[in-house]
Amino acid sequence: MRVKHLFIAGLFIAGLSFSGCKDKPTDKPKDKPTPPPKKEVTVSFDADSAYSFVQAQVDFGPRVPGTQAHANCVAWMESKLAEYCDTAFVMTGTHTDYSQRVFHISNVMGVFNPDATKRFLFGAHYDTRPQSDEDPEITDKPADGANDGASGVGVLIEVARQLAELNPTIGIDIVFFDYEDAGETGGRMDTWCIGSQHWADIKANEGYIADGGILLDMVGAEDATFALEAYSISHNQNLMLNVWATGQKLGYGKYFLNIPGGVITDDHLFVQKRTGVPMIDIIHYDLSTSNNFPDHWHKQSDNMDAIDKNTLQAVGHTVLHVLMNSYN
C-alpha cells in the first residue's frame, strides 16, 4: 500500500497600515514577554537492564497461552510492574471469536498516576506463537519468542523502571497484551491480536481516553530497521514523525528510517478502532527479506541470539524521551 505524505507550507503575510503624516503617533501596546522555552528533560535508559528482562521471559520457555510458562510469565510481569508503577494488575476475561472459539485472556497492566485525566498508552504483546510455522525444519513447535514478544515487554519494563525515578505528572498506562500471535496465516484479520481486542472492548466501555500511544513489536534484533507503518501514519502522524525525528536526533538514525512500511495488522490497529486512542506501531521492517519481517520471524532462531542491546537502547531511549518531552 502506498502512503501519501502531505506537506503543508504555511504562508504568513504581515499586513501594513498607513496613517497620515500629521497624525500623532499612538502608544504601542507593550509586547508580552516571551515565555522561556521549556527545558528539555534528560532521560536515561539501561539496555543491560532491558536485556535482562527479555532474558527472564525467555527463561520461562515459550509463552504459549494455556501453558505453565505463560502463567509464570504473567505472574512475573505483574510483579515487575508492581515494583515500579503506582499499581499493577492482571485483567482476565474471555473473548469469543467469529467461529465461537473461546479464548481465556490475561492482559497485564501497570499504571502511573491512575487519577490523572491526561494519559498516554504503551503496549507490547508477550505471548509466543504456538508453532514456528515459518521454520524450514521444525514447524510444529513454538520458538522462544525472544524478539517477537519478549523484546517489547523488556523495553517497557525498563521504561517503567526509569519512570519510577522521573515522577511523571501525567497518567501512563502500560499494557502487555495476551494472544497476539495465534492468528490464522492468510486468514481473517481478527484472528490476530485477541488480547488487545478484548482489552480495547473493555476500555471503550469504560470511556478510556489517552492522548496517544506507542506499541512495540519486534524491537530487539541486531541492526533492526523501523519504517513508517501506514496505519500508524493514519492514526497519529504527528506522534510517529516526532518519534522518528527524536530517534534520529538522539543518534539512532540507522534504526528509524523515513520510508513507508506498508500496513501491519497489530495490536495498535484494534486499540485505535475500538477506543479511538491514536496509537502507532514501532515494528521491525526488514529491507533484506521478501516479506519484510526479520529472518528469524516465527522460526526456532527467534532466541536470545537474535537480541541486540543496541537496538533495545535505541527504541527505549527514544520513546522515553518523546514521552517526557512531548506529553508530560
Image: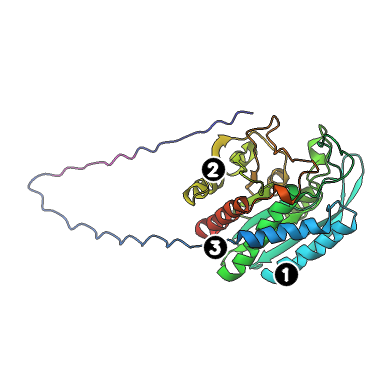
Image depth: mark 3 or mark 2 in front:
2
Magenta span covers which residues? 12-19
Q: Position of residue 220 (x, y in %)?
A: 66, 49
The residue lying at 66 percent from left, 59 percent from top is 50
Amino acid type of the residue tagged 2 in the rendering: Lys
Query: Which residue lies under the disc numbered 2?
Result: 254
Q: Residues within 10 Å of mark 3 (few under 14, many from 20)?
A: some
The Cα atoms of the two marked residues, 3 and 2, are separated by 20 Å
The colour mode here is rainbow
Name above or below for residue 72 compared with residue 307.
Answer: below
Q: Position of residue 18 (x, y in %)?
A: 17, 42
Dominant SS type (magenta): loop
Residue 209 visible, this angle: no
Whether the magenta-drawn stretch holds residue 18 is answered as: yes
Residue 196: give x, y in percent of width and height. 76, 50
For mark 1, what is the residue? 82
* Residue 233: numbered disc: none
Q: Are marks 3 and 2 in contact (CB under 8 Å)?
A: no
Is 118 left, or right, of 203 in this rendering?
left
Q: Is residue 11 left or right of residue 243?
A: left
